[in-house]
Amino acid sequence: MTDTSARAMRGDIRLGRVLSIALPVGLAILLVTLWWVSAALAQSAVLPTPATALDRLTANLQGQRFRQSIGDTLYRLAIAYVGVVVIGAALGFAVGLSKFWSDALSPVLYAIYSVPKIVLFPLFLVFLGLTDASQIAFAFFSGVLPMVIMVINATAGVPRLPLKLAASVNMPTWAVVRKIVFPSVLPALASALRLTFGLTFLGLLIGEMFAGVSGLGYELLRNIPLGRLGDITGEVALILVIALVPVTALSILEKRIKNRYSPVEG
């Protein structure tokens, strides 16, 4: 590789990194602009402007209870998502290594996943009550099934040729898993990390709405019957910001892993 091509490649990498950050930020700015224009044209109390939402959010952030709700949501989300990543990835990887268990469990997991999650939430209330445990468990349940399914499919779909070559030279099982299977699964795992974060967060907000006495989901639902539209839109904007930061970071991680471990076509 010549110096010119190397510099061009580094330039492309830097450009890709810049775009990965600039595009979400630009989209956010565009959406806020459209929101502002729509509110100004409507001139209705039903649709507050971004300035009104920001004012109400700033006022709410002054309150100890609202800040505690943010902390409670972040705490529950961290526990649920770590559980999704660790347990879901490990279980999916273990099941995917066995063709028998992969074929046997995949239809069951797909059937459970097809059931609307909100239908199952009363079961969490019955067994865990109106506690943090029920909300964390429901958030975990919302994210762990897709994590398991995606990792199972990725593990079971490892190309056969490298595995046959490894078997022909009597490569130890652990070496096959470490050098062939795991690198092949990493791109799908990176995608699962990004997708399941949003599903876990959504499950947590639903749990807080129905069973919480604190948290952003609880704060959001509490303001609906009171008709506090400025508070509602401000809290929705805050939720979007909280989600955007880790999702952007996970998207960057996903792109880097895919660039490194995805097979080259052609």
Image (cartoon, grey):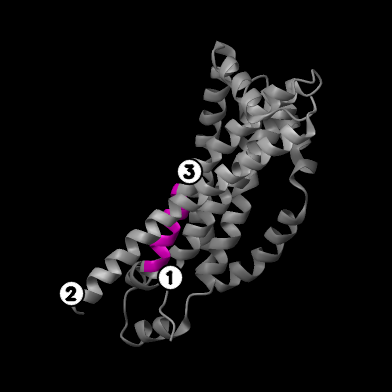
Name the disc covering residue 184, or none. Answer: 1
| Residue 109: percent from left, percent from top | 68, 59
> Is 236 situated above or below 112?
above
| Residue 35: percent from left, percent from top | 67, 38
> Is 117 situated above or below 225?
below
Q: Secondary structure at mark 2?
A: helix
Viewer-side residue, 127 vs 66 = 66
Name the disc covering residue 246, or none. Answer: 3
Magenta region, residue range: 249-259
Viewer-side residue, 211 vs 93 = 211
Give yes or no for contact between labels 3 and 1 (Cβ–Cβ under 8 Å).
Answer: no
Task: Give me the residue at 57% from left, 28% from top.
Answer: 73
Which residue carries the number 2 mark?
3
Q: Quadrant of residue 217?
A: top right
Tag 2 or tag 1, which sits nearer the N-term? 2
- In 3D space, how far apart are the residues under numbered discs 3 and 1 (Cα atoms)? 24 Å
